[in-house]
Amino acid sequence: MKQALDDTEDVSLDFGAEEEERALRTAKIRHPMATFFHLFFRVSAIVTYLFCDWFSKSFVACFVMIITLLSCDFWSVKNVTGRLLVGLRWWNQIDEDGKSHWVFEAKKPSLQNKTTATEAEARIFWLGLIICPLIWTGFFFSTLFSLKLKWLALVIAGISLQAANLYGYIRCKVGGEEGVPSSASSLLGQQFLQRLQEKRF
């Protein structure tokens, strides 16, 4: 009997882990500054585009202001808010051979990670990421049909910057749901193609 007692191990059962994780996920906003700036730059660019004639009669000043807001939005969404609000990030790196590689990562949420995004933050992130490029697409057609061609380059820049972030985060999300990091899968695919080419020659 004493032998049996000595062989047993203490096992800690964490019955409340799932409830605690669910409570963390359903909390309102855990990153208020990141959530604010996720929407601030992109909404400011749209509002400035719509009402820039009220601020300034100079096309160049309006163009520079909107491009600056779009650039700040691109940088903050790509480098800060995507990582904090949904645990996703993407970037481009150049290898030793000078080839460009796109890397897409999705962080799996865990109870130990206290920076886990909430459902409200994820909803704000994806709505802002999807709706704003659609608005810029609407601006593209309105600019085209109204023949305000001097604004066309600005609208195309807005579509390009916001569509790039949308594409990158969709790739991150799809790669994360499949359970294989997109960077690893693309690297495996490239190595497979290189081996095929080597065998061919």
Image (cartoon, rainbow, N blue to C red):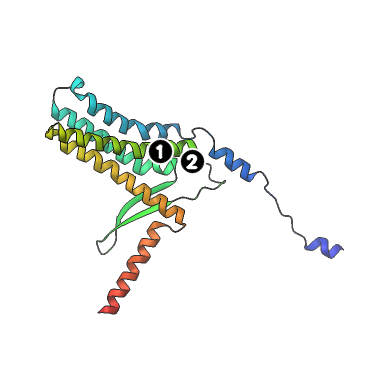
Return the disc, 1 or 2, that comes first in the chain's sequence. Answer: 2
Residue shown at the point (77%, 60%) measured from the top left: 8
Q: Classify residue 181 as left or right of residue 11.
A: left
Q: Which residue is mark 1?
A: 125
Q: Residues within 10 Å of mark 1 (few under 14, many from 20)?
A: many
**Image quadrant in which the N terminus is located:** bottom right
Q: Which residue is mark 2?
A: 117
**Residue 103 has which mark?**
none
> What amino acid does circle 1 point to?
Phe
Mark 2: which secondary structure?
Answer: loop
Please say if the residues under marks 1 and 2 sit with CB atoms less than 8 Å apart. Answer: yes
Residue shown at the point (58%, 43%) measured from the top left: 21
Residue shown at the point (40%, 40%) measured from the top left: 126
Residue shown at the point (33%, 44%) measured from the top left: 166
Q: Residues within 10 Å of mark 2 (few under 14, many from 20)?
A: many
Q: Classify residue 139 as left or right of residue 89.
A: left
Q: Classify residue 184 as left or right of residue 19.
A: left
Q: Distance between the Cα atoms at labels 1 and 2?
A: 10 Å
**Image quadrant in which the C terminus is located:** bottom left
From this view, report whether residue 24 is shown above or below residue 190: above
> What amino acid does circle 2 point to?
Ala
Q: Position of residue 180 (x, y in %)?
A: 44, 59
Q: Residue at the far right: name it.
A: 1
Q: Classify residue 143 as left or right of residue 131.
A: left
Q: Position of residue 190 (x, y in %)?
A: 32, 66
Q: Position of residue 154 (x, y in %)?
A: 19, 36
Nearer the observer: mark 1 or 2; the answer is 1
Mark 1: which secondary structure?
Answer: helix
Q: Position of residue 77 (x, y in %)?
A: 35, 40
Q: Quadrant of residue 19?
A: top right
